[in-house]
């Protein structure tokens, strides 16, 4: 079983889940939905790895994480973030 580190952020009425190990994101109406979409993206990427040899995969940089956490919006009701460990499979 594989685990990933996920940062959750509420943005414009949606939740966005960012995987720190590969930079993939999932978006949903609640944290669980966004993690579910992220898991689908990770599974799809794993399928691609099995058939393609030239696929870029790297953890996100500190700069990219900072950008994800500090994206400004016109109407920010609150800054809500969560850090979770999500298992795949």
Image (tube, rainbow, N blue to C red):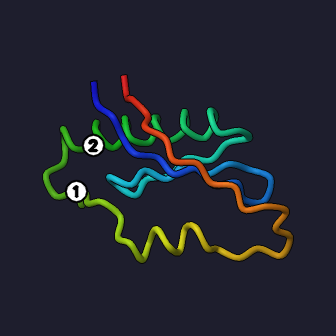
**For residue 50, what is the image quadrant?**
top left
**For residue 87, what is the image quadrant?**
top left
Label located before the other in sequence (2 or 1)? 2
Looking at this view, is 67 or 40 the one in front? 67
Q: Who's the residue at 28% across and 31% down the image?
A: 2
Q: Using the image, determine if residue 3 lies above or below residue 13.
A: above
- 2 lies left or right of 66: left
The residue most toward the left is: 53
**For residue 36, what is the image quadrant?**
top right
Q: Which mark is residue 48?
A: 2
Q: Position of residue 37 (x, y in %)?
A: 55, 38
Q: Are marks 2 and 1 in contact (CB under 8 Å)?
A: yes
Which residue in the structure is indicated by mark 1?
Answer: 55
Q: Who's the residue at 78% across and 59% down the image?
A: 12
- 18 lies left or right of 78: left
Q: Which mark is residue 32?
A: none
Q: Quadrant of the N terminus?
A: top left
What kind of element bears circle 2? Answer: helix
What is the crowding at mark 2: few (fewer than 14 residues within 10 Å), some, or many (at least 20)?
few
Q: Label 2, label 1: how many angstroms apart (C-alpha)?
A: 8 Å
What is the crowding at mark 1: few (fewer than 14 residues within 10 Å), some, or many (at least 20)?
few
Looking at this view, is 47 or 89 the one in front? 89
In this figure, what is the number of numbered marks? 2
Looking at this view, is 61 or 28 the one in front? 61
- 75 lies left or right of 60: right
Q: Position of residue 46 (x, y in %)?
A: 28, 39
- 60 lies left or right of 37: left
Q: Using the image, determine if residue 27 lies above or below residue 68.
A: above
Q: Position of residue 15 (x, y in %)?
A: 68, 48
Q: Quadrant of the C terminus?
A: top left
What kind of element bears circle 1? Answer: loop
Q: Who's the residue at 36% across and 41% down the image?
A: 4
């Amino acid at each position: 079983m594989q685990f990933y580190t996920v940062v959750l952020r509420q943005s414009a009425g949606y939740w966005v889940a960012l995987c720190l190990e590969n930079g993939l994101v999932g978006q949903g109406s609640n944290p669980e939905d966004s993690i579910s979409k992220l898991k689908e993206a990770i599974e799809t990427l794993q399928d691609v790895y099995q058939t393609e040899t030239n696929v870029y995969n790297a953890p996100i940089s500190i700069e990219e994480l900072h950008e994800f956490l500090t994206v400004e919006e016109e109407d920010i009701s609150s800054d809500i973030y969560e850090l979770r460990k999500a298992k795949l499979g």
